[in-house]
Image (cartoon, rainbow, N blue to C red):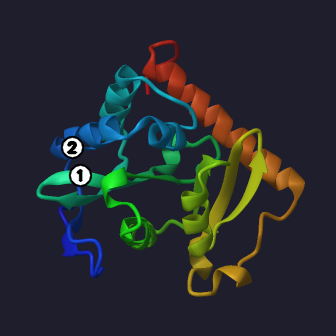
Amino acid sequence: MHHEDTTGSTRAKGSVRTLRRQELPLLRDHLLRLDRASRHDRFHGFMDDRFIERYARKCADDGTVIIAYLEDGVVRGAAELHPPEQSPDSQPEIAFSVEASVRRCGVGSILFRKLIADARAKGYRSLRITTGAQNDAMRALAHKFGAHLAFRHGESTGTIDLTRQGQPASALPAIASAIDAANAIAGFNRAYWGMLLRMYGWGRAA
């Protein structure tokens, strides 16, 4: 569905809407514009242009929902909602990227809020988020929306319980135990490296 609304922010002046499938090249161009540090944070490592081009094509084909923040028709920030079928534990996963030119303008919060609304509309009960351990802005944003993150090997991963989003973040349960945290990270790593292999043609096609 094609949806558009204003951001409601006094700082961010663009619009937020869900991209159509044929508009996915706008996501590719946005990801290619990310500076080296931002690209590292988004993909948990520096990925070359060829990987990003393949990644954007895959998003167009696997049912990923892209909620974009646009200024003058150009995507400057994106929230990705990956379907549970892409995850080994059938949990939908989310990811965010914001270009340096629109940071500290509330764009991340705007995208996060819209993504959660879309996820609830799809009937999802929880979301997984994974980010680099050094990505302080994303970790703070995730915590603001109720994610409790566990840290391991330079990454942090956690779950947002959509059934309890009305409560303050401090009232939400953390990942129950170290075993749960390890299982969550292991599940992400299997999915992530599987995606890398498919991107470079070394594994089974998605």
Quadrant of image for the C terminus = top left
Tell me residue 67's x, y (percent). Answer: 31, 58
Image quadrant assignment for residue 170: bottom right
Q: Please tell me which residue is depicted at 69% across the width and 50% down the height of the picture.
A: 156
Q: Which mark is residue 26?
A: 2
Q: Please tell me which residue is depicted at 37% across the width and 41% down the height of the picture.
A: 34
- In the image, residue 45 sits, relative to residue 6, either above or below, namely above
Instruction: Quote the CA–CA distance across marks 2 and 1.
Output: 6 Å
Q: Is residue 13 left or right of residue 125?
A: left
Instruction: Indicate the amino acid at tag 1.
Output: Val
Q: Which badge, 2 or 1, is on the more N-terminal residue?
A: 2
Quadrant of image for the N terminus = bottom left
Query: Can the viewer see residue 99 in this picture?
Result: no
Query: Which element carries disc 1, helix, strand or loop?
Result: strand
Q: Residue furthest left?
A: 72
Q: Please tell me which residue is depicted at 37% across the width and 47% down the height of the picture.
A: 64
User: How many residues crowd around disc 2 within 10 Å: few (fewer than 14), some, or many (20 or more)?
Assistant: some
Label total for image: 2
Query: Can the viewer see residue 134 in this picture?
Result: yes
Tell me residue 148's x, y (percent). Answer: 70, 66
Q: Are marks 2 and 1 in contact (CB under 8 Å)?
A: yes
Q: Residue furthest bottom?
A: 167
Q: Which mark is residue 122?
A: none
Q: Please tell me which residue is depicted at 17% across the width and 51% down the height of the picture.
A: 74
For mark 1, what is the residue? 75
Image quadrant assignment for residue 45: top right
User: How many residues crowd around disc 1 within 10 Å: few (fewer than 14), some, or many (20 or more)?
Assistant: many
Instruction: Indicate the amino acid at tag 2.
Output: Leu
Tell me residue 142's x, y (percent). Answer: 58, 65
Query: Which element carries disc 2, helix, strand or loop?
Result: helix
